[in-house]
Image: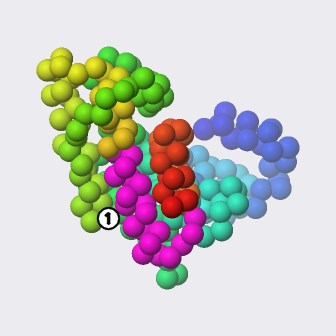
C-alpha cells in the first residue's frame, strides 16, 4: 500500500498537503484485501487530517469509465469475480443483470487452466479462439437479465475430456456463446433504460472479440 501511494504522489506531481480527501474501496471484494486498503486509507486520513470517502468498487468502474467521453452509459462490467450490467437510473445506481454463479473472467481462467494454458488464461484463450474454425454447440444460459456460466464450464470440461474436439474450436465456441449472452443482456438493459451508450469495464472488456460484438450490437 505504502509503495503504491508513494508512486501515485510522485506520478501526479502533487504534494501530500494538496490532497483534499482519501477514498477507499468499501466493497464488493475479498474481505482481507478490503480491510488492508481501508486500514491504510485510515492511516493517511489521520496523518493528513482529511476526510475518508468510502467507494463502491463497481460504481467506481462506471464513473471512471466516463473519462472515455461517455455521458450516461449502461456499463457491461466483465471482470474476474464480477459480471454485472450497471447503470444510473431514477436517481440510483442499479444492477440490471448479473451472473448467477461465477464471474466471466474466473470462468475463462478456469477453462484455460483445464486446457493447461496457465494463468491468467484470458489473453491465451483469445489468441487460441482466433485459430478456431468450427463452432461447437454449447449450452446458452440467459435467464431474464441474468446469465449462468458454471454449467457451460462443466460442458466444456466434458468436451475436453472426450478428446473429440480441437482446443482452438472449443475456445472459439466458448467466446462466441458466452459473449453473445453478455451482449444480449447488455442490449436488453439499453432498451429498458433508453440509454444510447454502452461502456465496457473490467479485464474481460479487453477482449477484442467481445468489443467487436458489442460494437455490432450498438451500431444495429
Task: For the N terminus, give its image quadrant.
Answer: top right
Please indicate, yes or no, whether residue 47 appears anywhere in the rendered image: yes
Callout 1 environment at 10 Å: few (<14), some (14 to 19), or many (20+)? many
* Element marked by disc 1: loop
| Residue at x 41%, y 28% (from the top left corner) | 129
Q: Is residue 180 magenta?
A: yes
In the image, the segment drawn in magenta is 178-197
**Nearer the observer, 36 or 145:** 145
Residue that numbered label 1 is attached to: 145
Q: Position of residue 216 (x, y in %)?
A: 51, 53
**Nearer the observer, 170 or 79:** 170
Q: Position of residue 52 (x, y in %)?
A: 62, 61
Q: Position of residue 105 (x, y in %)?
A: 40, 39
Most common secondary structure along the magenta stretch: helix
Q: Is residue 78 above or below residue 127?
A: below
Q: Is residue 29 magenta?
A: no
Q: Is residue 173 left or right of residue 74?
A: left
Q: Is residue 174 above or below residue 93?
A: above
**Nearer the observer, 218 or 39:** 218
Q: Position of residue 203 (x, y in %)?
A: 50, 41
* Furthest residue toward bottom: 90
| Residue at x 14%, y 20% (from the top left corner) | 162
Please indicate, yes or no, whether residue 30 appears anywhere in the rendered image: no
Q: Is residue 205 above or below residue 67?
A: above
Q: How is the image coloured?
A: rainbow
Amino acid at each position: 500500500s505504502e509503495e503504491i501511494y508513494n508512486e501515485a504522489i510522485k506520478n501526479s506531481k502533487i504534494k501530500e498537503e494538496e490532497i483534499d480527501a482519501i477514498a477507499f474501496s468499501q466493497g464488493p471484494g475479498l474481505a482481507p484485501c478490503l480491510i488492508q486498503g481501508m486500514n491504510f486509507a485510515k492511516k493517511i486520513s489521520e496523518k493528513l487530517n482529511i476526510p475518508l470517502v468510502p467507494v463502491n468498487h463497481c460504481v467506481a468502474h462506471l464513473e471512471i469509465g466516463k473519462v472515455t467521453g461517455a455521458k450516461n452509459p449502461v456499463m457491461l462490467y466483465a471482470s474476474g469475480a464480477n459480471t454485472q450490467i450497471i447503470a444510473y437510473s431514477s436517481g440510483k445506481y442499479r444492477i440490471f443483470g448479473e451472473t448467477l454463479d461465477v464471474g466471466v473472467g474466473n470462468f475463462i481462467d478456469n477453462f484455460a487452466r483445464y486446457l493447461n494454458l496457465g494463468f491468467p488464461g484470458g489473453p491465451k484463450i483469445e489468441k487460441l479462439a482466433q485459430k478456431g474454425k468450427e463452432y461447437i454447440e454449447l449450452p446458452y444460459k440467459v435467464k431474464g437479465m441474468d446469465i449462468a456460466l458454471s454449467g457451460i464450464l462443466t460442458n466444456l470440461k466434458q468436451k475436453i475430456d472426450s478428446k473429440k474436439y480441437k482446443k482452438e474450436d472449443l475456445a472459439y465456441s466458448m467466446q462466441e456463446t458466452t459473449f453473445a449472452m453478455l451482449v444480449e443482456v447488455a442490449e436488453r438493459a439499453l432498451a429498458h433504460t433508453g440509454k444510447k451508450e454502452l461502456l465496457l469495464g473490467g479485464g474481460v472488456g479487453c477482449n477484442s472479440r467481445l468489443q467487436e460484438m458489442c460494437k455490432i450490437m450498438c451500431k444495429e
